[in-house]
Image (tube, rainbow, N blue to C red):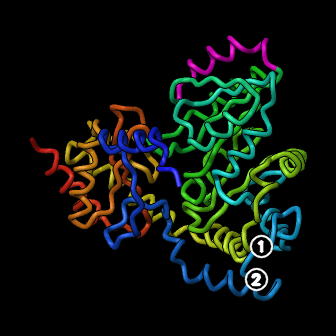
Amino acid sequence: MKAFPAYLEYKLNQRKQDGSFRMLTHKSKEVDFSSNDYLGLSASKEIYEAAHKMLLQKNGIANGATGSRLISGNHILYNDAEEMIAAFHNAESALIFNSGYDANIGFFSSVPQKGDIVLYDEYIHASIRDGIRLSNARAYKFSHNSIDGLKLLLKKFKDSATEIYIVTESVFSMDGDSPDFYSIAKLSAEYNCRLVIDEAHAIGVFGSTGEGLAQQVPVFARIVTFGKALGCHGAAVLGSSILKQYLVNFARSFIYTTALPPHAVATILCAYSCIKGNNTERQQLRDIISFFTEEILRMGLNTIFITSSSAIHCAVLPGNKKVKKIALALQDSGFSVKSILSPTVPAGQERLRFCLHSYNTKQEVTNVLTFLNSLLVP
């Protein structure tokens, strides 16, 4: 057998040299400031037992989906789940995908066409970028959360595109901030565009019932994911019934993959029921977010933290090696805090990413920030 390709090995070695080499690690027992399990629902015994009971009532034991949804995997629970999700989010329809990555790949690779233009926030998720690359549309980025930057592009391309899609997120995964939805929606209407919003990090966290941030904004499509605050797996594209029909026929990441197993769909249903009927965890999370912000200000750390009102707070500490060293020191002291390295973020924007949860305590917050502060002292 031939040796591993030399150029690929060279690329790996480059990652090691610049400090961006990635390795898999097991989930630790450290204080959790890294997972997306914002409400702690991934460990909910209530959801686990309710999903098991629902599955037995609907179809008995079913360990696997047995095929794609277009062949044999379209379990009866899918219809229940999609109707419930659409109603919960005040949408005409919902189509479940296996993950947020699959949903974004499927949507953006199949919906924008040749002659269309996609205008996207420069900080959108990698899955959206990958989907856009697979489409035949032209794509241009605007500066992060810049209404003026978006408007300049709209003026430039308003007469040269069949359709214009504006793409943003309701909570950005690497900054934790949010755009001005209403200004973007106003521009979208003014220039007759189609607005698409990824709500991955807002679902379950924001809104009176955890519906997210963009429910009141007129959109062409929303992407919601279940692997974060809902504590389970999968995602859905929300939109019109005809959009759902289109995706079933043309979204390759939907068509050519084995469906989620029935138990996963049952868990989605039960997780939604949990967040709809219980505001306790959401209020606890809001309290911890407020306390974290207060402690940042009290300790004078606001100069390195990006302003955020979400569960994601990032301290920018430029340099892969520097930020990795600090993250490892935090981990060695019992805090699960992860470093985000370039090229995941631009060079010079490397950071520590703190994810807050309803189950974090005020003492844990004070302790981790106090220790971080001590590591920053020259």
Name the spot of residue 238 as percent of width and height, x first: 76, 50
Residue drawn at x 90%, y 45% is 242
The amino acid marked with disc number 2 is Ala
Name the spot of residue 294 as percent of width and height, x first: 30, 50
Magenta stretch, main secondary structure, is: helix
Say which of 98 and 96 sits in front: 98
Task: Tell me if I can see residue 94 in this picture.
Answer: no
Whether label 2 touches label 1, CB < 8 Å: yes
Query: Is 92 included in the stretch rendered in magenta?
Result: no
Instruction: Give the vertical position of 175 relative to 295 (above or below).
Output: above
Q: Which mark is residue 62?
A: 2
Residue drawn at x 78%, y 67% is 81
In this image, 19 relative to 191: left or right? left
C-alpha span from label 2 to label 1: 7 Å
Residue drawn at x 68%, y 85% is 52
Query: Is 147 included in the stretch rendered in magenta?
Result: yes
Residue under numbered circle 1: 65
What is the secondary structure assignment of the residue under circle 1? loop
Point out the stretch of residues depicted in magenta: 145-161
Residue drawn at x 88%, y 45% is 246
The amino acid marked with disc number 1 is Ala
Instruction: Give the vertical position of 255 relative to 240 (above or below).
Output: below
Neighbourhood count class around disc 2 (C-alpha, 10 Å): few under 14, some 14–19, many 20 upward: few
For residue 134, which quarter of the picture? top right
Quarter of the image for the C terminus: give it.
Answer: top left
Say which of 203 and 78 sits in front: 78
Name the spot of residue 230 as percent of width and height, x first: 59, 65
Task: Tell me if I can see residue 87 in this picture.
Answer: yes
